[in-house]
Amino acid sequence: MIEIGETMGDLSTNKIVFCERSWKTPVSILAFLILVTFAWGAYLLDNYDEDGFFHGADDLSVGQFLARNIAMPDVQRLYYTVPPAVVGVGGNGVNAGPVASGAVVGANGYVITTMHSIANMPDITVQVATSAGIRRFPAKVVKTIPAHDLALLKMQTTEKFLHFRMANFQAVVPGQQVFAFGRNMAGAPLVRQGMVQSLDAPLAVGTTQITHLLRTDSVYSWEQTGGPLVNAQGDLVGINIAATSPTGKVEGFTVPASVITAHLQDIIRFKTPVAAPNVPPTQPLPTR
């Protein structure tokens, strides 16, 4: 049996272990974890864009989809992959076909087309090709750029869409292979392969003189107006304008990606391809 006096004596000799342990180590660890948490939060905020995607993640862009699945996509694969990001733009009539094409440039439904195509159109509908057929989404005009005949639309939906990255315009040169896409009156995709003919061409649209355009022979139909001109990597080189020459021939012009970015970067954080690292050439070993 344990006597009460003995118990009290034992308790009087006990020591509170917590008070004797060093508190500096756990506090330092806690402070470190807090700093890491704030740094991670700052990284997420810096790398999260309005489309709801993180840079470097699966951003649903045509170019990234192609690069992830094949290093150098062939033409047939390009023809298969690009059309879902090419839309028809028209009115809201039940049987109304597109009056122009458009290019989806944001996963949350931003579309670029030509301004003259939607002028005086009270209601706008964007027609998107899906595996279940053509779907129609109402759209609103977000911004127009009369100097370059551009209009930015936003589809009124919370759905996500395959879209284009902006091509590196510094890499665009005369003679480069390009592909002009569009959608015809029935909503079917059309495309023509061609090349960049010149980099600084003018064009008169009504009373507006547009400058700094590309010339391309890949545009052959008015149905490609507003549609994308893409490179072999599936990135957006520009937005097409089909013009009719005095002889009645269709001439192709393109508002380049650099102009589009300059006008619309206040609204959209455009995605661009990641540049390959500049690796210096390996120096040969000296011979003896």
Image (tube, helix red, strand yellow):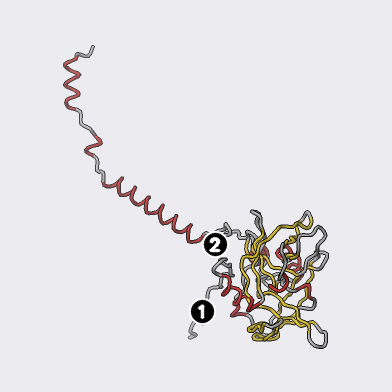
Disc on res. 141: none
Residue for point 65% across, 70% down: 151
Residue 265 sits in quarter: bottom right
Q: Secondary structure at mark 2?
A: loop
Q: CA distance from mark 2 to mark 1?
A: 27 Å
In the rendered image, residue 150, in percent from the top left (x then y), is placed at 66, 73
Give the residue pinned by disc 1. 280
In the rendered image, residue 53, in percent from the top left (x then y), is placed at 57, 58
Nearer to us in this view, 24 or 254: 254
Q: Are marks 2 and 1 in contact (CB under 8 Å)?
A: no
Please name the amino acid that badge 1 sits on: Pro
Residue 10 sits in quarter: top left
Please name the amino acid that badge 2 sits on: His
Q: Eyeballing the image, is 245 above or below 116? A: below
Which is nearer the N-term, disc 2 or disc 1?
2
Residue for point 78% across, 66% down: 98
Give the residue pinned by disc 2. 55
